[in-house]
Amino acid sequence: MTDDVLTPAQLDGIRSRVRDLMPQVRADLEALVRIPSVSASSFDQSQVARSAEAVAALLAAEGLEVEVVTEGGRPAVIGHVDGPEGAPTVTLYAHHDVQPPGDESDWTTAPFEPTERDGRLYGRGAADDKAGVMAHVAALRAHAGDLPVGLTIFVEGEEESGSPSLETILERHGDRLAADAIVIADSTNWAVGAPALTTTLRGGVRVVVTVRTLDHSVHSGMYGGAAVDAVTALVRLLATLHDDEGSVAVAGLDSGEAADLDYDEARFREESGLLDGVELIGTGSILSRLWTKPSITTIGIDATSIDKASNTLAAKAAAKISMRLAPTQDPASAFEALKTHLEGHAPWGAKVEVSLEESGPGFAADADGPAYDQARASFADAWGTEPVDIGVGGSIPFISSFVERFPEAAIIVTGVEDPDTRAHGANESLHLGEFEKVCTAEAIFLARMGALRAR
Ligand code: BES
Ligand code: MN
């Protein structure tokens, strides 16, 4: 490309600088992973404070003006450095908190002891999202002392807990986050060797549904047969949430069609670990089922456990339901639809109560314009292959607050993950070869954005 904003020699320079930086970037990533910064409130929150301090120190070492801000939630780190006069501005987002490790016995090596196996770095947060943090640091280091853009970095400490204080942070510090482009490094690529921009995410609604059938629990021999226990009524109610094909049966939910990328059932089975003989649920293309149609999952049940069971009709049972929404669905109307469904399908007149736990909107990017052009070009420079636009079935609810607050900014969702990352699961890992490409792409993106001004 002769009219490109960067010369091949400039691109090669960035590629080789990032390659040289990777050993230190990797060491700093490992140090972050060793801090068990689980933001869930039942975990030691002093570790979240420690990880905020560690991130702040990394940014200060790159010459940024850094502040750790806590606005009623967990500490976030904001760093800033001015760019050349008149240069575009870029804000980089990642989060330093992590999901709980789950059952440590499911991990091959300890969750907070980063360990390399077969080109992957294992550990909680090794990908989601401490590698996102380090990709930003790597991009800064690649331009040490000569940053081509004005840059702000925002590293949140509670994304995995639904960003409860983000609105307050935006109210009090939002002006500092305004930029021409906002890069949110918290998603996935399409495959190893296949970079992607995430242009849609699903929204979500989480509820607890409680079912009561009796005033108190009673002997199942004396009353079973004429009175129904609450667990059986709950299970029957949950069964109404899908039709026979496994499509969501709640009326009034939006549903869309995903782009037609090559993704077959064999790949889905391989990546999801669906057991042989277990059928897929839903209809339409698999990607539509994952990215643009609603889904409903029962994520927890409160009922008598098997070891405590006796011959008793339970009076009460409850389930936690996680519903994913089409990217443009309004979560409030989705909650109403789910509540109406559950209340309207109470079996045998069982008492049903639905309470909203959490909800958040999806995201559908305005995926063009100069910043998107340069993002796509940077990915192609780093991987040697054009990126694809993908949807993601998961949610990053706070993005909608950014869209609202910074309507002029190009919001670009990138990430370090690949289909084998197992974010949130046991044995989460980062593909180290892909990670270098993510760092290279981001460093090139900053150079490209800076070069736009010079044209
Ligand atoms: N990074 C994920 C979102 C994601 C999932 C991106 C899968 C790409 C692929 C994010 O940290 C996340 O897990 N979000 C939560 C919602 C949040 C409110 C806890 C989710 O989707 O469950
Ligand atoms: Mn994440």
Image (cartoon, grey):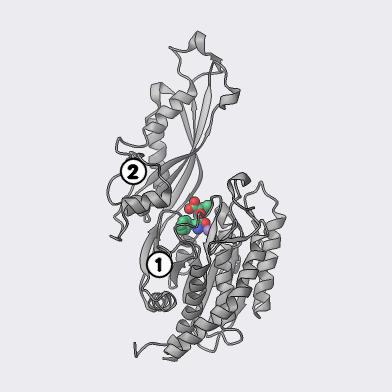
For label 2, count other residues whose C-alpha is less than 10 Å away and answer few (under 14), some (14-19) or many (20+). few
Instruction: Relative to 108, say whether 390 is above or below.
Output: below
* Residue 443 image point, x, y percent: 51, 79
Q: In which quarter of the image is residue 126?
A: bottom right
Q: Return the residue found at the far front.
A: 118
Instruction: Relative to 79, say whether 112 is above or below.
Output: above
Of the 4 image quadrants, the one containing the N terminus is: bottom left
Of labels 1 and 2, earlier in sequence is 1
Q: Can residue 191 be seen in this view?
A: yes
Q: Return the residue found at the far top.
A: 222
- The residue to which callout 2 is attached is 280
Query: What amino acid is at disc 1?
Result: Ala
* Residue 272 image point, x, y percent: 42, 49
Asked if the residue at label 2 sits under 8 Å from ligand 1, the reply is no
Residue shown at 72%/56% (left/top)?
46
175 and 385: which is toward the camera: 385
Query: What amino acid is at disc 2?
Result: Leu
* Mark 1–mark 2 distance (CA, rounded to whole Å): 25 Å
For label 2, the SS is loop
* Residue 278 image point, x, y percent: 36, 39
378 and 320: which is toward the camera: 378
Confirm or deny contact between disc 1 and disc 2 (CB under 8 A).
Answer: no
330 and 388: which is toward the camera: 388
Q: Residue 358 carries which label?
A: none
Of the 4 image quadrants, the one containing the C terminus is: bottom left
* Residue 312 image point, x, y percent: 54, 16
- The residue to which callout 1 is attached is 196
Q: Can residue 397 be seen in this view?
A: no
For label 1, the SS is strand
Residue shown at 48%/20% (left/top)?
229
Task: Give the number of marks.
Answer: 2
For label 1, count other residues whose C-alpha is less than 10 Å away and answer few (under 14), some (14-19) or many (20+). many
